[in-house]
């Protein structure tokens, strides 16, 4: 037990030292405001990325067995099922997303899923290849 605590303490110390070292190196830029903007955008991207990636994987799983024109993502099913002529895949959004596309339309294997960030209201989308981009109007 004592060795486990020492190993954990050492790991935390090494991680903290590395973080401080990287922070010192990253402040060489003369425009610190731009760095903060990029960090905020990356945080927003990560904010709904899990929802987008999980939803994308659910659609890919549905398409692995059959060519569907639409796949529904629903929190009220525990296993893939067919309802109303659609493949319905289990999906529960995290609190990070205020909205995630419920019915995904597939066109020749291509699809897009959108999610709105609960924190910022920004809309992000993921395509069949896993590329996440911000939706601008």
Image (spheres, rainbow, N blue to C red):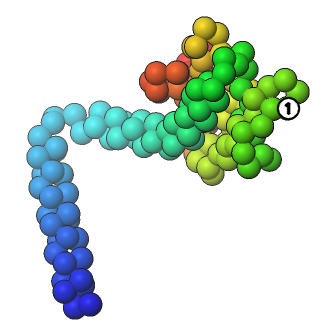
Instruction: Using the image, determine if residue 79 lies above or below residue 63.
Output: below
| Location of residue 26 by image quarter | top left
Quick check: can you spot residue 114?
no
Residue 85 in the image: state x and y as whole percent: 84, 23
Quick check: can you spot residue 79?
yes
| Location of residue 46 by image quarter | top left
Instruction: Using the image, determine if residue 92 lies above or below residue 115.
Output: below
What residue occupies the far front of the structure in this picture?
A: 65
Q: Mark 1 points at which residue?
A: 83
Residue 39 in the image: state x and y as whole percent: 35, 41
Residues 94 and 69: in front is: 69
Measuring 63% from the left and 26% from the top, which residue is drawn there? 65
| Location of residue 107 by image quarter | top right
Measuring 67% from the left and 35% from the top, which residue is drawn there? 100
Quadrant of the rendering where the C terminus is positioned: top right
Instruction: Using the image, determine if residue 10 lies above or below residue 134.
Output: below
Instruction: Using the image, determine if residue 110 lies above or below residue 13.
Output: above
Q: In this view, does 19 lie to the left or right of 70?
A: left
Quadrant of the rendering where the N terminus is positioned: bottom left
Q: How crowded is mark 1: few (under 14 residues within 10 Å), some or many (20 or more)?
A: few
For label 1, the SS is strand
Measuring 11% from the left and 40% from the top, which residue is drawn there? 28
What residue occupies the far bottom of the structure in this picture?
A: 2
Residue 105 in the image: state x and y as whole percent: 69, 18
Task: Give the total number of marks visible in the rendering.
Answer: 1
Residue 127 in the image: state x and y as whole percent: 52, 21
What residue occupies the far top of the structure in this picture?
A: 108
Measuring 46% from the left and 37% from the top, which residue is drawn there? 45
């Amino acid at each position: 037990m004592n060795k486990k605590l020492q190993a954990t303490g050492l790991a935390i110390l090494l991680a903290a030292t590395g973080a401080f070292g990287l922070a010192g190196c990253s402040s060489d830029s003369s425009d610190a405001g731009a760095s903060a903007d990029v960090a905020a955008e990356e945080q927003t991207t990560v904010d709904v990325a899990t929802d987008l990636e999980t939803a994308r994987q659910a659609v890919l799983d549905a398409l692995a067995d059959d060519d569907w024109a639409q796949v529904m993502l629903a929190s009220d099913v525990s296993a893939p099922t067919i309802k109303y002529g659609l493949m319905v895949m289990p999906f529960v959004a995290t609190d990070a997303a205020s909205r995630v596309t419920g019915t995904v339309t597939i066109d020749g294997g291509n699809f897009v899923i959108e999610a709105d960030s609960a924190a910022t209201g920004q809309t992000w989308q993921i395509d069949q290849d896993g590329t996440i981009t911000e939706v601008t109007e």
